Amino acid sequence: MPIPRPDPQGDRVIAHVDMDCFYVQVEQRRQPKLRGLPTAVVQYNDWKGGGLIAVSYEARKFGVKRSMRGDEAEMVCPGIQLVQVPVARDKADLNVYRSAGSEVVSILSTKGRCERASIDEVYLDLTDAAESMLSEVPPEALEDIDKAALKSHVLGLSDDEDPEKNVRGWLCRSDALRQDKLLACGAIIVAQLRGDVLKETEFTCSAGIAHNKMLAKLASGMNKPAQQTIVPSSAVKELLASLPVKKMKQLGGKLGTSLQNDLEVNTVGDLLKFPEEKLQELYGFNTGTWLRNVARGICGDEVKGRVLPKSHGCGKTFPGPKALKTSASVKHWLDQLCEELSERIQLDLDQNKRVAHTLTLHARAFKAGDVEPHNKFPSKSCPLRYSAIKVQEDAKRLFDSGLREFLGSHSKSWGVTSLAVSASKILDTPGTSSILRFFQGKSFSLATSDVSYDEFCNDGPSSSIGCQSYALPECEENQEVFAHEESSKEPDKPSQDRINDDFCRQNRKQKVTGSGSILRFFSGINTSINQASNETEIQAQSSENEIHEGQDMRNPRQKHAIDERGMDGRISHQHTNGSWNFNADEIDHSVVDELPPEIQQEVQGWLRSSKRAKTARKGSNIFHYFSSGENP
Ligand code: TTP
């Protein structure tokens, strides 16, 4: 369910960068002779030349579409170059595309907070960079403006015989609104970044630059390939007035269909005809408010600082006659998928010190003579144990349990048409000391602290309910993975919204008075601490309630941290100038939301298995818990 978040106070500059025909570009870099030729990347499959998954812009001119099979593409575009996706373990191997995406992310993340939204797209929060530029070298003071910036499309800017001159005029207007000036700076920064990406990776990309994620995402696809589009606030109304409702993220499915059929809402702008209360009455409190906001181009979703995937997944489909009909064939394929998944989570652990906690199995299946063909195979999860064999065992157990549920009393034959496994709840390894990393760069004089209200509020308390409306692909999944449909729905949380608003107000006040609770705690700590110092240790305690029948289900890093816990089961953090410790069981987990996103993950890693936290006192704040040597 979409969650409404008002635009935060203050103008933001958000960019959405999307690679152009990404897999094709990756293949063209591998085989430069393909450059400039109509090319498509084909999914591993021997039926009718395989399914197209990426199509070059040269091939698109001939009418080649992603929905086509290879044979059909060759008919509409004789001479098209069809490149097979690499194959490993008899299935598509996307590693080459994942790594190429990471190369791009490492360049784009140099200018601001960067959220990797999928294998080939990122959001950037360029607010700080744009503000610095505006105060130091505003566009009108620049001698040269990047050619790519001058080629920007500015929505609402009237056509001119000399578009570049026209855009230069817009970028350099000294009498423009401050929000437009910031967008102009953002556009120049994005043009430079796109140039860097091209130079360093040989890939082109397109971008949208706006005041929020929703508008930036809409804009990035408007002018492709290798172009960028700016959305000034003054152009939003007109943009949404003509935008088909189904084109809006989150409105492509049932909600969009209901708007069209039940309310005759065909464009996003049509929603303006309905008062918020009416939308709430029809679709629930949060969705109603979200729709009201969407109609006005309002979206407060934050760009989350996340350059690594939120989860890993891989899967395979078995269409038509290829459906798996025996337990042995399911096991064979699950073993392949689990092996790949294990390799990827192990790599993530080794390279990024991140631990995945949950294994989920998804499947699609049918049963012979099914009277309820819409009956879905239930997705099943369990704690994730590291090692390929354990993942394989657990995935098979999950499958068997799902199959029992799926079949019910039905004992006839069945078939599986797709299988996928995913690893999620990926957290920093306890002990990576990200708290210190974060605070090292901060001033600890409260009056001059550069830890902003935004850092605490926007990614803080709201995060649990916030960016859901932009639930971007959580897995960089194999193309053979089908979308897994979760039955759980996010309940409306109006009261939570209010709590968060109150929190933000309170926190803002704290910043003004210089008494931010977490800062107050950390102000007593010697921040010049060297992370490599042996004096810094984080010891985490976990009750790990999810361990199965005496088995040690913990992953290796987590186990290590647990083994180091104090005898009294308290988490303690010690260093040169002081120490703090507290009992994880007594912590209200909601206080973690007060922490900046950079360190929330790590702290959540310490706390997640402490089930007794549910009984902790409400209304406590982080200072309460972190007070040196005191328990709440
Ligand atoms: P997209 O960004 O949707 O498309 P694209 O990059 O190929 O082309 P565009 O310039 O229009 O953005 O997808 C990124 C890559 O993800 C794409 O190159 C191939 C892969 N992909 C699939 O494998 N299957 C799919 O159904 C989609 C949508 C994408």
Image (cartoon, rainbow, N blue to C red):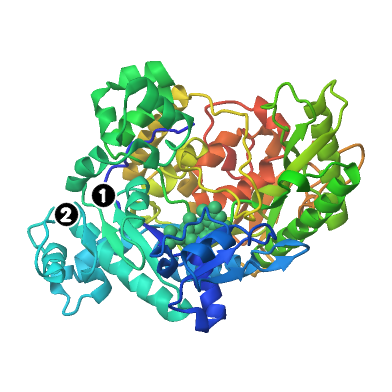
Q: Is residue 514 left or right of residue 369?
A: left
Quarter of the image that includes the C terminus: top right
Q: Where is residue 171 in the image (x, y as percent from the top left)?
A: 16, 64
Secondary element at tag 1: loop
Secondary element at tag 2: helix
Q: Which of 445 and 620 is in front in this view?
A: 620
The local crowd at label 1, few if under 14, some if 14 to 19, many if 20 or more residues have their Cα within 10 Å, is: some
Q: Is the Cβ of the residue at disc 2 closer than 8 Å to that at disc 1?
A: yes
Q: Is residue 101 visible in this depiction of the protein?
A: no
Q: Where is residue 337 in the image (x, y as percent from the top left)?
A: 77, 54
Q: Distance between the residues labelled 2 and 1?
A: 8 Å
Residue beneath label 1, please? 11
Q: Which amino acid does label 1 sit on?
A: Asp
Q: Which mark is residue 178?
A: 2
Q: Is residue 548 visible in this depiction of the protein?
A: yes
Q: Residue 345 carries which label?
A: none
Quadrant in the rendering for residue 9: top left
The local crowd at label 2, few if under 14, some if 14 to 19, many if 20 or more residues have their Cα within 10 Å, is: few
Q: Position of residue 397 (x, y in %)?
A: 86, 40
Q: Which residue is drawn at 41% across and 70% down?
A: 58
Q: What residue type is labelled 2?
A: Arg
